[in-house]
Amino acid sequence: MFAVYKREFFSYFRSPVGYIALALFSFLSGLLFINQFGSGAISISSEIISLRSFFVVIIPVITMGLFAEDKKRGTEILFYTNPLSLFDVVLGKFFAALSLLGVMFLNVIVHMIITAVNKGVVDIGTWGSVIVYFFLAILFIAIGIFASALTDSQIISAILSFIIILIIQLISTISTLASSSVSSFLSGKMFSMDAEKVSKAVEKVSNGIKWLDPFAKTQDFRYGIFSVAPLVFCLSGALIFLYLTYRVLEKKRWAQN
Amino acid sequence: MIEITNLVKRYGDKKAVNGISFTVQKGEVLGFLGPNGAGKSTTMNIITGYLSSTSGTVKVNGHDILEEPEEAKKCIGYLPELPPLYLDMTVLEYLNFMCDLKKVPRAGRKEMLAKILSMVKIVDVADRLVGNLSKGYKQRVGIAQALIGDPEILILDEPTVGLDPNQILEIRKLIRNLAKDHTIILSSHILSEVQAVCDRVVIINHGKVAAIDTITDLSKKLSGSSKLLLSFKGSVKDVKNALQALPGISGINERVSDSDIHEIDITVSNEKGSDVRTSIFYAMSKGGWPILEFRSLDHTLE
């Protein structure tokens, strides 16, 4: 696993990808940090939460090449014909992408130090935001890796993970839309249900969709209210996608076409 | 060393490999010969664990490639058709990465790499990016990669394809050197190449074994039934009669006839020291039949 990890992590810095991602992140986080200067109160938590919305761009970029490039260049054969397991390969690549994100995050750590030195607020809630940031990153990187294993084109892989991550980020909007359409459908001519039943059904639908939202699940962390369930949710989601990636790779051996 | 029994690989309705069985002894150089699309690469991919067979077993050093993949893969160095190179690394970085993949212990790694670099003659490009190397050098880096970890078995899929004649000779020399202490399976669609380096040949066609033989037996069979092509003016019947009287000729077939120009195949049963070509020439001149073309038909695999 470590061999693959080492190669993938350093390969970010053999091409422009790593540098561009780092520069972009430094710029955005710096902008978000400086923007708060005028308000008089610096909140690292809100900086981190704003940064999360850039996952939808950054994560597809850092994961798109992980398997797609190997497939295109024919180097994936190395993973099958050498004495290592395919799951080690998946984990190696996963941790390489996570490490790059960690390196990017050093920017925020610097901002935290600046804030703390100047007697600003760096409290348990800030650390809660950091924890959430990385657990969401783990989930999204796993999705990006899965997308990369499905195709030998980096572009297609990036678009695929972009779409999946976008949908996850928009879950709360989607649930609002869905509940309003369910409500108008049920109270319409076809069913003409009474208001009480309709509101119950709507609640069920919207709760069902919201259950999938990792952002809503983790929103209390920034106030220092921690719970294990949301973290388990992110981790198990990541594991499912990593396992699916492993199966996609394994399938290559047995496929009959 | 390698035991292959009844290998089948099915792609949809098509069987790319259809019941191939053979064994490779320790220290042997086995040539894998066949036209493009015969199933050579598929068979090699199955032996190395890249693909799984639909049915049949592969045993490498007694380890089944599916039951104990790690043990089996440790014994094999593989150069696929397309060398699996990372173009963004230098040669040395790449080979070090391969050492990591093959779990070569750190101690003694430097010496091993130095030995491999000088063996395949890539010492002077060791610090260059793989992507900037010429095709011949890339091929050598591919061979270097297969040699890492000192595997007992080397599997080389068309190691000389796309190289210039000089490089081909060098790679063949390298393979002969490696053959001294490795078991090698080598695929090719060029007969002369297999003849130059292999002890034994497996010829496959349409996913089936067409022949397994040693090189000496094979060339005996080939030279034992060599053919000549003769094109002349005159009557076929008279020429046939005149030539059949000569010793060393076992058969004459008519090929094409175009008014008074005829082409015939002469099958020669080569006996030692006798060259029938001179006697054919004299017989033809004696009969007054002008020879328009006279050449030997090489036995090619195709």
Image (cartoon, coloured by chain):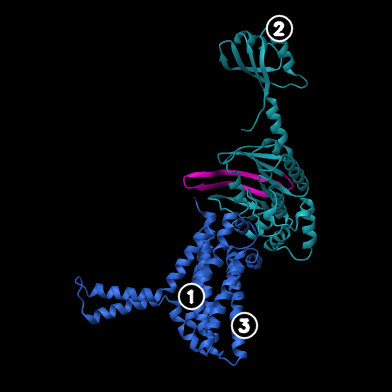
Vertical relation: B277 (above or below) A95: above
Find the distance from the CA under tag 2 to the CA under tag 1.
97 Å
Which label sits on residue B273? none
Q: Amino acid at mark 1?
A: Ser
Tell me if mark 2 has few (under 14), some (14-19) or many (20+) residues whose alpha carbon lies within 10 angstroms of its own.
few
Residue that badge 1 annotates: A53
Instruction: Please tell me whether mark 1 sits on a helix, a strand or a loop.
Output: loop
Find the distance from the CA under tag 1 to the CA under tag 3.
20 Å
Parent chain of label 2: B
Say which of A145 and A89 sits in front: A145
Q: Position of residue B23 (x, y in %)?
A: 66, 45
Q: Colour of chain A?
A: blue
Residue B108, quarter of the rendered image:
bottom right
Is residue B27 among the parts visible in the rendering? yes
Instruction: Please tell me whether mark 3 sits on a helix, a strand or a loop.
Output: helix
What main secondary structure does the magenta stretch of the protein show? strand
Residue that badge 3 annotates: A110
Tell me if mark 1 has few (under 14), some (14-19) or many (20+) residues whose alpha carbon lies within 10 angstroms of its own.
few
Q: What residue is shown at x 57% (from left), y 62% (from top)? A: A65
Q: Colour of chain B?
A: cyan
Q: Which residues are magenta?
A: B1-28
CB within 8 Å, label 1 to label 3: no
Q: What residue is shown at x 60% (from left), y 8% (from top)? A: B235
Which of discs 3 and 2 lies nearer the camera? The answer is 3
Same chain letter for marks 2 and 1: no
Q: Earlier in the sequence, mark 1 or mark 3?
A: 1
Say which of B3 and A252 sits in front: A252
Judge left or right: residue B96 versus residue A70: right
Parent chain of label 1: A
Instruction: Please tell me whether mark 2 sits on a helix, a strand or a loop.
Output: helix
